[in-house]
Image (spheres, rainbow, N blue to C red):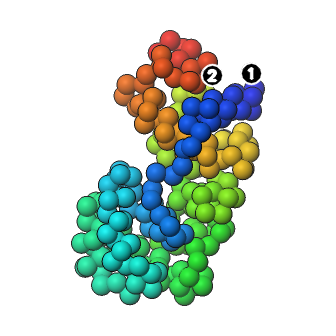
Amino acid sequence: MTLSAKAGHVARALEARYPDALCALAYEKDYELLFSVRLAAQCTDARVNIVTQTLFRDYPTLRSFAEADLPALEEAVRPCGFFRLKARDIRAAARMLLSEFGGRVPDTMNDLLRLPGVGRKTANLILGDVYGKGGIVVDTHCLRIANLLGLCREKEPHKVERALDPLIPKESQSAFCHRLVWHGRDTCVARRPRCGDCVLRAYCDFFHRGA
């Protein structure tokens, strides 16, 4: 079976298992997703959603983030960890969005990577979820499961992204990556994968090696 064929089988199996899989972060505005992803580094999506309920109420506009008192913003995001760095990045990103992008989150990889605290994972998430342009979001679930399946043999996120990009149609990439996250939390758990219950076992190199 070719990698493209395997990827197609995997994508269809994931879609059947998780038809409504979406980004787990709660947001209404483009910049809210950007800031939520920044807060989610080394923090659970569930905790971020709790914090942003209050955060987005207290800072209701992009300008309110740009003009925020930094110590107060740090306290607001403290439960997400690394709060000083995250608060600094969020305020700096808000200022750049206003000064250079007309108050909108940009829609190109190069422009997104200019924003403080934004790497390729965040940029691809924005491109896929906000703009529908596609993008392989390589988080820990994507990296691990793609290697277990045998869709790639890479350990560096940018190499996993490069390997998966031609295998998954652009219009399906965002949903595919969200479904990998759901699958990683639901079945293919890092330290105790439930292979017997896995809808991907027929296509999984790890399973067929007898692990």
94 lies left or right of 161: left
Q: Which mark is residue 179?
A: none
Q: Is residue 13 above or below residue 98?
A: above
> Where's residue 1, x and y in %?
74, 21
Q: Which residue is mark 2?
A: 203
The mark nearer the N terminus, 2 or 1, is 1
Q: Residue at x 25, y 79 (%)?
A: 71
> Where's residue 158, x and y in %?
58, 49
> Where's residue 124, x and y in %?
60, 57
> Where's residue 18, x and y in %?
56, 37
Q: Secondary structure at mark 1?
A: loop
Is residue 25 in view? Answer: yes
Viewer-proximal residue among 189 and 23 = 23
Q: Secondary structure at mark 2?
A: helix
Q: Quadrant of residue 64?
A: bottom left
Q: Is residue 169 above or below residue 48?
A: above
Query: Type of residue at label 1?
Result: Met
200 lies left or right of 57: right
Q: Quadrant of residue 187?
A: top left
Question: Dots 2 and 1: beta carbons under 8 Å?
Answer: yes
